[in-house]
């Protein structure tokens, strides 16, 4: 059948929406995130990785959407095959009905021809018998008429049997066509229901991905602000420590936490600071202060 089926259109569009869901979610996240120029490079990369993992987790897999789409496509294909079988059965039923009509018409024509031929034979026999004798004519006419009646009855019985068989075959195939049409309608309804279910699941997944993207954007903004505050504090501490070193005062560095000392070492650009202990950080900061002095 050349025209496009509604089920094909529905399953193709639903599948296209699911395939484009990850890219659409990624675009939405990129639009909602603030500029990364204000945050450190390491913090930005960590935030991007967390956002990508969260978006991938939000996309349904397994039995959530993809399996339902497969079921919808399989059901649509079964419905289409059932519909094609129903159409073929209906066409075969029509052909059987046409053959039954042709058989009946041919039988009627043959019987009419046979009647005319038998009538001609009877009349010929009567005419021949009348010339011989009236008694012989009567016997010949009766015998001919009996033969004609017997042959006519036999042919009529055969014709009726052929017509009855042809009509029965047509009725059986017509019933089969009706059953296939009903089955095709049922399969079509099932395929539509599965397609609707898959579309609803896809919409729910998209809404969940959108919600998580908004949450991740808010978290990323808060992390960026916190990082800015830490960098500013480290710079202030570095400036204060550098000033104390120039004046010959190292300050009470041991009272600071290791995290504060790491921020201070980062502000003073001390190499290998992440691998140093707290005491080593104190010594390195003092050396750097003396070197600047």
Image: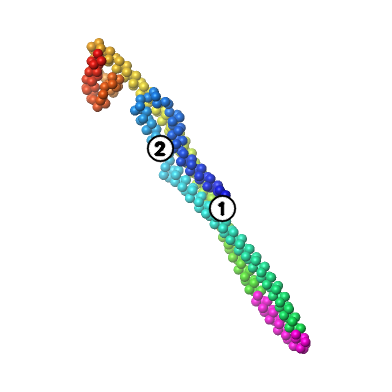
* In this view, the mark in front (2 or 1): 1
Q: Nearer the viewer, residue 126 or 58?
A: 126
Q: On residue 212, which mark appears?
A: none
Q: Report x, y in % for residue 139.
A: 73, 86
Q: Is residue 57 visible?
A: yes
- Residue drawn at (34%, 21%), measured in percent from left and top? 231
Q: Nearer the viewer, residue 199 or 268?
A: 268
Q: In which quarter of the image is the C terminus?
A: top left
Instruction: State the image coordinates of residue 290 (x, y, percent, origin top left).
Output: 23, 15
Residue displayed at 34% across by 19% down: 232
Q: In which quarter of the image is residue 114?
A: bottom right
Residue behind mark 2: 56
Secondary structure mostly seen in magenta is: helix
Q: Is mark 2 on a helix, strand or loop?
A: helix
User: What residue do we see at 43% from left, 34% from top?
Assistant: 26
The picture places residue 266, in percent across and down from the top left corner, at 29, 22
Q: How crowded is mark 1: few (under 14 residues within 10 Å), some or many (20 or more)?
A: few
According to the image, label 1 marks what residue? 1
Drawn side of residue 158 relative to residue 64, left or right? right
Image: magenta residue range? 128-155
Q: Can residue 254 be seen in this view?
A: no
């Amino acid at each position: 059948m050349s025209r496009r089926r509604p089920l094909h259109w529905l399953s193709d569009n639903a599948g296209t929406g699911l395939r484009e869901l990850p890219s659409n979610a990624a675009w939405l996240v990129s639009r909602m995130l603030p500029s990364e120029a204000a945050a450190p490079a390491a913090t930005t990369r960590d935030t991007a990785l967390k956002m990508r993992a969260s978006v991938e987790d939000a996309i349904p897999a397994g039995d959530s959407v993809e399996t339902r789409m497969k079921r919808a496509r399989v059901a649509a294909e079964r419905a289409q095959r059932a519909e094609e079988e129903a159409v073929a059965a209906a066409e075969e039923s029509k052909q059987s009905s046409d053959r039954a009509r042709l058989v009946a018409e041919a039988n009627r024509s043959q019987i009419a021809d046979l009647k005319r031929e038998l009538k001609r034979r009877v009349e010929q026999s009567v005419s021949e018998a009348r010339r011989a004798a009236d008694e012989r004519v009567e016997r010949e006419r009766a015998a001919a008429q009996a033969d004609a009646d017997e042959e006519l009855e036999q042919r009529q019985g055969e014709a009726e049997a052929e017509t009855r068989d042809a009509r029965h075959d047509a009725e059986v195939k017509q019933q089969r066509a009706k059953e296939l049409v009903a089955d095709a309608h049922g399969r079509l309804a099932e395929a539509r229901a599965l397609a609707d279910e898959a579309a609803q699941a896809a919409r729910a997944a998209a809404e969940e991905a959108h919600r998580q993207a908004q949450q991740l954007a808010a978290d990323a903004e808060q992390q960026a602000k916190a990082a800015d505050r830490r960098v500013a504090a480290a710079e202030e501490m570095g400036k204060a420590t550098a000033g104390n070193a120039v004046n010959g005062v190292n300050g009470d560095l041991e009272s600071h936490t290791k995290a504060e000392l790491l921020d201070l070492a980062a502000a003073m650009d001390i190499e290998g600071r992440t691998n140093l202990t707290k005491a080593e950080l104190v010594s390195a900061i003092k050396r750097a202060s003396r070197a600047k002095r």
